[in-house]
Image (tube, grey):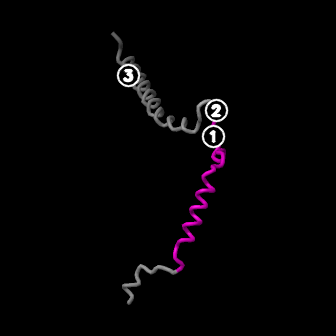
Amino acid sequence: MTSGPMKAVRAFLALLGLLALLGILASVPTTGPVSAQYKPGRGPVAPGDHPPEKKEKADEKGYSSSLKRLPDQKFDPWGNMRK
């Protein structure tokens, strides 16, 4: 049989081990999203590292044509209330 102080030391070490295990388990979910910064087979991707898209010219043409189709007059949403 173990003595009183020895039981306290074992209980303290068991508690310390449990807290360490909980600390490790708590940090595991926070490291998951870091892998989203890496592409398979390559290193980290820089924010400006993406090639320019060819769709930008088509989008720009569509935006310009839609601006040309807008009426020149200003719209007053409260116009009926002021009369």
Q: Few, some or many C-alpha atoms within 10 Å of disc 1 (few <14, some 14-19, many ≥20)?
A: few
Q: Which label number is shown at residue 45?
A: 1
Q: CA distance from mark 3 to mark 1?
A: 48 Å
Which kind of residue does numbered mark 1 sit on? Val
Quadrant of the drawing holding the N terminus: top left
Q: In the visual, does 11 lie left or right of 52?
A: left
Query: Residue reaching furthest bottom?
Result: 83
Image: 12 above or below 69: above
Q: What is the quadrant of the C terminus in the image?
A: bottom left
Stretch in magenta? 43-72
Amino acid type, label 2: Arg
Q: Up-down: is 20 above or below 69?
A: above
* Label 3 crowd bin: few (<14), some (14–19), many (20+), radius 10 Å: few
Q: Position of residue 27 (x, y in %)?
A: 48, 34
Question: Residue 11 bears which disc, if any?
Answer: 3
Q: Position of residue 53 (x, y in %)?
A: 63, 49
CB of mark 2 within 8 Å of CB of mark 1? Answer: yes
The answer to if 4 sits in the magenta stretch is: no
Q: Is residue 22 above or below residue 80?
A: above
Q: CA distance from mark 2 to mark 1?
A: 8 Å
Q: Nearer the viewer, residue 58 or 53?
A: 58
Of labels 2 and 3, earlier in sequence is 3
Say whether disc 3 or disc 1 marks the residue closer to the N-terminus: 3
Residue drawn at 38 percent across, 19 percent down: 5
Numbered disc 1: secondary structure: loop
From the image, state whether disc 2 or disc 3 is nearer to you: 2
Residue 28 or residue 5, whichever sits in front: 28
User: Residue 30 at x, y = what percent?
Assistant: 48, 37
Amino acid type of disc 3? Ala
| Residue wearing tag 2 | 42
